[in-house]
Each structure stands twice: as structure tokens, then as C-alpha cells.
Image (cartoon, helix red, strand yellow):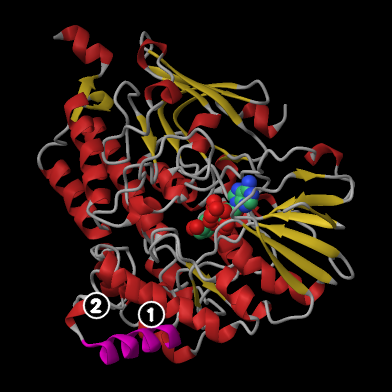
Amino acid sequence: MSAKQQRETTVDAVIVGAGFSGLYLLHRFRKLGLTTRVLERGGGVGGTWYWNRYPGARCDVESMQYSYSFDEELQQEWHWPEKFSAQPDILAYANHVADRFDLRKDIDFDVEVKAAHFNEATRRWRIETDKGEKITAQFFVMATGCISTAQTPNIEGLDNYQGNTYHTGSWPHEKVDFTGQRIAVIGTGSSGIQAIPVLAEEAAHVTVFQRTPNYSIPSQNEPMTSDYEASWKEKYPALREEMRYTGHGSMKDLNDKPAMSVDEEERQDTYEKRWEIGGAGFLASFNDLLFSQESNDTASEFVRNQIRRIVKDPETAELLAPKTYPIGTKRICIDSGYFQTYNRENVDLVDISEKPIERITREGLVANGREFEFDSIVFATGFDAMTGTLFNVDIRGRNDLALKEKWYAGPRTYLGLMSEAFPNLFMITGPGSPSVKSNMLVSIEQHVDFVTESIIHMREHGLELMEPDVAAEDDWVDHVQEAANKTLFPRANSWYMGANIPGKPRLFMPYIGGVGTYRRICEEVVADNYKGFRFEAEAAAAAAE
Ligand code: NA7
């Protein structure tokens, strides 16, 4: 009998995904004595960092902050080679964590979950995999990440193309050699912006197809210095605790002044300094950049002027300068020499903002009435974010209600953790939680701790099922929208708004009220006897009543 066949098919918990959420969940569930199976679509751990192996892939949060805090020895012993880590280093870290805590033995790789149905009679989830295995579990956790379903646009003729195609979000494991090739890159979000400078160094020619230009700030990445590392490690527990109550779950040094409260000289000076420091801290230059259009305009114009300064060809510079949405309302990009790349002889920019790519041909593609030939096409076209991966599984709760059906007009959750009619289904960093508007590691740890402690609470009180109240959920859904509507975020056609996926409801999916504020709300919910959640006693206990 193979090791896999010996695995139990009735367990306390099934976790989908072995990224940073799934790994930490498994660690905590095990300590609790829960029998747990983790089912992972990929061939290894690491989630996002397993799939996104494109050249130049790098985290846009500093590694001293984008790492686990739950184990003091781990955070003291691990060494990050750079300030902003490259994908291979983050993947190595995920593998180290899996080995260090001996997690692999409860993870099945190369297994895709197809369906999960809640059975009201048995009060258990029945989970079905693509291998035909059926597993019964009391708790079912979707730890599938927020941006894990890669999206290739449905362009006519794609199947006829004779060259190679790649998607940044599902990159081959072996090195792709682009030497001497003419390549197209479609998409200029974070992935395109990171990949283009590296591809341009290798390929004979790169043509970038841009639908919407992005604001990007230099990362000013550098090798980790021992002083900087020590400054974090000396005070790690205290700094981590401070991060948990910040706006975004990271230390950004927010200037507490509004942009228009200072004169033009101070404003420009502030932006200059932040640009020199680099990274997403640029958006913390003033405290109202994401709330006031007037203030935002000054930051947007500063970045446009930086682009005009860097890019030598004025026409290209103008095309690269975003003008149709406020800075920060589409995810800010962090780059290493992106705009400078357009000064290279072997890089061209094609603006497709007016007319989409017409079709893909055997040799290349047609855009703006012009035919291009390419050896390879790289799709850096993003993801069906926040809900896409949840909907890929046929999740059904009470009365056979499909999650996709319940959420047809947009996600409905309480705290981004659970949805009414789906008892004991937890989502890690689900829609309606700070998730992608935060340092993911901080939000992941908070959700994993919340879920684990909820299960401890249930066990201590003889409770079997946990589920939000409809009223609490409705209020939370409204609150998520109210918080978004106080900001400039709804003004952009971003993936936060579902706008990149044809037919997806247009509404802001993450909770923008702040990581610290959200955490306090969760703490109050628990302190108030899990206000907004209802529980059902274990069946035997209920029958005895
Ligand atoms: P993004 O940020 O969604 O970027 C995708 C890019 O692809 C963006 O420029 C899109 O233009 C473009 N796109 C998407 N579909 C098309 C079509 N059909 N034609 C032309 N261009 C298209 O994804 P990334 O992978 O870069 O980044 C995702 C997140 O990963 C990132 O925010 C970080 O959190 C890490 P659009 O702007 O929609 O006009």
C-alpha cells in the first residue's frame, strides 16, 4: 500500500494550499492535536512563490517584515540576502519552514481539490480531489491565496500561435533561455514591470504591449547589511507587535501631515526623499494621498515627472506616464530599473489603450493594424484575484447552496473569514479582510491564529459548528464598501475592483479600514463571545438537551 493510500480519509481538518497560510495552519493544527490533510495543487510548498518564477520576480515588501513571526528561533536564525528578496530566496525560506517543522508528511502535492460539499446530516465537509479521493472533515480551510488563478486573455487565434507562450504566474521550473529571441510582453502590472528589465538584458528584442501604464517606484534594493539585519533582530518581537497594529501591517513611517498642509517646496522635497528611499513607503509621503484627489494629484504628477526625466524619448515617456487614475489606487509597483529599460535600443512600447490586440497569428500578433512576429509571447496579464480560486472549487454549503451563486453580485463574508450558510469553512485572507492591502504575512498569521483559537473555543465548549449571523455578515459587507468609498480606490479599474476580469462584479474586495483597526475589531469580536458568529453544539450534546 502506498503512503498516500494509507492516509486517513476522515480527518479533523482539510486545508487547501501549502503556501504561507497552509504551512502555518498545519503547524498550529498539529499542535492542537487535529488530524489534518493539506492538499496542494503544486509540486511543492510556497504558493505564490512556487508558481511565480518569472525572471525578476521579487517581493515588494521588505523581507525582514515579509516573513513569519510565530517562532523566535526561526526569525533569529534565518538570513535574508537582500532587502527585498527575490523569488528563489522566498521559496527557499518556505521549503526551510516546511522541513524545520516537519510539515511535508501531511501534505499531498499535485492534488487539486475539485469539490467540497457540506452535509447537513453528518455536519461534515466532503472534499473531492482530481484523483478521485473523497475526504471527510469537520473543518475545511481555503488557504489558497488571493492572487493564485492566472488569467490569460482570450485573444482570437491564440491556439494557432507557433512560438512559445508563457504566463508570469505559472512560469516553467527550468530556466527559459530567451537569448537571441524576439519576444512580446503583454501586461505592465507588477509582474511585467519586474520581468521586462531582466528579459531585455537577455532577449534580442522586447516589444511591450501596454493597456494601462502603472506608477512605479524604485525599490532601491540592496544586499542586506549586518547592521540593518541586527537592527530588526535585536527588537524583533516588539517590532512585529507594532507592525500588527499599523495601517498596512508594515513599518512605513507615515508622515502625519496632509499633502496640502505644506508648501510646494516642502512637498516636492518630501517626494524626492521618499523616491530616494524607494519602495511603497512613497505612498506614506503624506497621510491623505489615498483620500484626497487634490493631494494625490501632487504625488501622481511627481511620479509622472520622474518618468519624463528618466525616459529619453518624450513620446514613450508620455505613454508610460499614468494619467487616468490616482496613484496607489491600482497596486503601486516597485521596480528595479523599469523606466530606464525603455532607453535601450532593443525595447519598444506599443500602446494598446485605445484598441485591444486584434488577434494572435501563427508568427506573432496584430495590434493597431500592424503585424508583429515573435519567437515567444509572455503574458504578464494578472489573475482572477480574491474570488477566482475560491470559485474554481465547487464549494456548496447548507441546502446545496454554491458559494459562487451566493456571491454572484460580489463576495459576502463576515470579517473576510467565513460566509453564512457555509459552517466551518474558513478562508485565510478572504475577501473583506485586509489581505492584499496589507503585508500578507501579518494578515496570514492573524487569520491562522483566529481560526485556530476559534477551534480551541469550540472544543472547550462542546461546539461543533461555527458560522456567521446573516445580520453581522450584511453589516460587514456594507462596512467594507463604506471604508472603500471613503478612499480614492473605487476610481481605478483595478483587480482590487474585479475590473480586470470581464463580467466580474465591480466592487472593492479587500478591507481598507487598516490592519490594526481590523485586528482590534477581531479582538473585540472574540472578547464579546464571538459576536456575530453562531455556534451549534456537538450533535450528541444537542440530542441530550
Ligand atoms: P496585474 O497587476 O493585474 O497586471 C496585469 C497587466 O496585464 C495589466 O497591465 C493589465 O492591463 C494587463 N492586461 C490584462 N489583460 C490584458 C489584455 N487582454 N490585453 C492587454 N493587457 C492586458 O497582474 P500582475 O501579475 O502584474 O500583478 C499581480 C499582483 O501580483 C501585484 O499587484 C502584486 O500584488 C503581486 P490593465 O491594467 O488591466 O489595463
- Foreground residue among 33 and 19: 19
Q: Amino acid at mark 1?
A: Lys
Badge 1: residue crowd in 10 Å (few <14, some 14–19, many ≥20): some
Badge 2: residue crowd in 10 Å (few <14, some 14–19, many ≥20): many
- Quarter of the figure with the N terminus: top right
Residue 99 in view = no
Q: Earlier in the sequence, mark 1 or mark 2?
A: 1
* Residue 360: x %, y % from top left: 79, 45
* Residue 336: x %, y % from top left: 59, 78
* Residue 239: x %, y % from top left: 29, 74
Tell me the residue at 62%/43% (across/down): 151
Depth check, mark 1 against mark 2: the one in front is 2
Q: Classify 244 as above or below 145.
A: below
Q: Amino acid at mark 2?
A: Ala
- Foreground residue among 9 and 197: 197
Q: Classify 385 as above or below 120.
A: below
The answer to which image quadrant residue 262 occupies is: bottom left
The answer to which image quadrant residue 534 occupies is: top left
Span highlighted in magenta in the image:
263-276
Question: Outermost residue, front direction?
Answer: 369
Tell me the residue at 72%/30% (across/down): 2
**Residue linked to disc 2:** 259
- Quarter of the figure with the C terminus: top left
Q: Main secondary structure of the magenta part?
A: helix
**Residue linked to disc 1:** 233
